[in-house]
């Protein structure tokens, strides 16, 4: 059975976290759930539901609401960057499926126009959100992720030296289109914030050098965060990988309000709170490996300590290090959620 809510879903509680203020009770945060968790919490199957439809959005909202969250994260429209189908295994190649290799393939690529996409579900859901719940719009991948998908990681590295003009053109087209997608989504009152989801690195370093990130990637993220702030709404960055060398850029240049995704083998959420918590909201952080390998009591103990930080210090929302993946044992995920819902 899904978790039954015991609290009013007040999006203002997440706003307090993003403003680094204390909250009366722990606030939960995930970028998304895997299909199995959506269906479990909503007590309903996705079978027969069209992707990106209002019905799908309603299921996602119900799942987040039942699980104790004050928002639901969804895509604003069908906008994206189509490419060749990739084989869906437990991991993926960063080179498979690339479609842009030269100027001819860049010019012939069928770029989607975000202004011609359908965002109407963001209006249709407005009267159906329970309590003071809001939508948090995430992107169809991020700026760097989509460039890597379109050109391939190895090819991107070669382009840095062999054809930087083409690489800049790809980044500018992806960045400007992604920015416009967020600008369109931010117009709707149902949207309370955005998540700019863009993985930037490995466990040990970023995919590109710090200098190249600042040249090609970060300017577009700065514009995305500025667009959210112009609309009077927060901007959250979800990015996996070792961010230690660029965290100051995230805070001082891009001016994101919150950062999500943490791994113990890179830099634990507790260390991140200690180092950066006074300057940016820290979201999630219960490492996925910890979720799987720790016993239930250890999960409860660590989740409780993190929940205490959010209540007593402020600027922290409780959640996993990445997302509620299908392989996280359900009793452990529910134990984390229960700590927030029944906090004392």
Image (cartoon, helix red, strand yellow):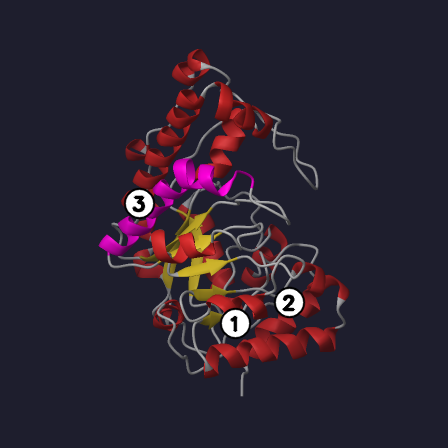
Q: Earlier in the sequence, mark 2 or mark 1?
A: 1
Location of the C terminus by quadrant is: bottom right
Decide: few, some or many residues near mark 1? Use Cα within 10 Å; few <14, some 14-19, many ≥20.
few
Q: In the displayed structure, does residue 337 sit left or right of residue 77?
A: right
Residue 26 location (% of width, % of height): 49, 77
Q: Residue 235: name its quadrant.
A: bottom left
Q: Is mark 2 on a helix, strand or loop?
A: helix
Question: Where does label 1 land, which residue?
Answer: 274
Residue 222 among those drawn in magenta: yes
Q: Is residue 14 visible?
A: yes
Residue drawn at x 64%, y 67% is 333
Location of the N terminus by quadrant is: bottom right
Question: Where does label 3 land, which residue?
Answer: 223
Residues under numbered marks 3 and 2 in contact, where contact means CB atoms less than 8 Å apart: no
Q: Is mark 3 on a helix, strand or loop?
A: helix
Residue 109 location (% of width, % of height): 43, 19
Residue drawn at x 28%, y 34% is 115
Q: How many marks?
A: 3
Q: Residue 114: name its quadrant.
A: top left
Q: In the displayed structure, does residue 200 sit left or right of residue 224?
A: right
Decide: few, some or many residues near mark 3? Use Cα within 10 Å; few <14, some 14-19, many ≥20.
some
Give, as a single range, the part of the protein colored magenta.
Answer: 207-231
Of circles 2 and 1, the one toward us is 1
Q: Which of 129 and 69 is in front in this view?
A: 69
Residue 324 among those drawn in magenta: no
Question: Where does label 2 land, which residue?
Answer: 333
Q: Is residue 173 above or below residue 66?
A: above
Of circles 3 and 1, the one toward us is 1
Q: Earlier in the sequence, mark 3 or mark 1?
A: 3
Decide: few, some or many residues near mark 2? Use Cα within 10 Å; few <14, some 14-19, many ≥20.
some
Q: Is residue 104 above or below residue 79?
A: above
Q: Which of 139 and 69 is in front in this view?
A: 139
């Amino acid at each position: 059975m899904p978790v039954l809510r015991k609290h009013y879903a007040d999006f203002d509680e997440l706003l307090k976290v993003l403003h680094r203020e204390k909250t009366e009770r722990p606030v939960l945060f995930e970028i998304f759930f895997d299909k199995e968790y959506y269906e479990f919490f909503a007590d309903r199957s996705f079978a027969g539901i069209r992707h990106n439809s209002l019905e799908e959005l309603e299921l996602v909202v119900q799942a987040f609401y039942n699980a104790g969250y004050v928002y639901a994260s969804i895509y604003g429209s069908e906008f994206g960057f189509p490419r060749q189908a990739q084989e869906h295994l437990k991991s993926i190649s960063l080179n498979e499926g690339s479609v842009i290799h030269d100027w001819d393939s860049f010019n012939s690529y069928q770029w989607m126009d975000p202004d011609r996409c359908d965002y109407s579900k963001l209006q249709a859901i407005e009267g159906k959100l329970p309590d003071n719940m809001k939508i948090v719009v995430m992107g169809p991948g991020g700026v760097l992720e989509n460039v890597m998908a379109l050109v391939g990681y190895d090819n991107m590295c070669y382009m840095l030296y062999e054809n930087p003009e083409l690489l800049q053109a790809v980044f500018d087209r992806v960045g400007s289109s992604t920015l416009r997608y967020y600008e369109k989504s931010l117009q709707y009152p149902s949207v309370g914030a955005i998540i700019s989801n863009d993985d930037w690195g490995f466990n040990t370093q970023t995919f590109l050098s710090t200098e190249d990130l600042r040249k090609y990637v970060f300017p577009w993220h700065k514009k995305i965060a500025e667009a959210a702030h112009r609309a009077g709404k927060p901007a959250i960055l979800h990015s996996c990988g070792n961010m230690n060398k660029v965290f100051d850029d995230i805070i001082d240049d891009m001016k994101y309000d919150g950062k999500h995704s943490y791994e113990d083998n890179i830099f634990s959420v507790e260390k991140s709170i200690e180092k950066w918590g006074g300057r940016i909201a820290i979201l999630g952080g219960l490492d996925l490996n910890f979720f799987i390998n720790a016993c239930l009591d250890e999960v409860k103990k660590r989740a409780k300590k993190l929940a205490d930080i959010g209540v007593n210090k402020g600027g922290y929302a409780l959640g996993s290090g990445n997302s509620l993946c299908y392989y996280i044992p359900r009793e452990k995920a529910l134990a984390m959620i229960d700590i927030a819902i029944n906090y004392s």
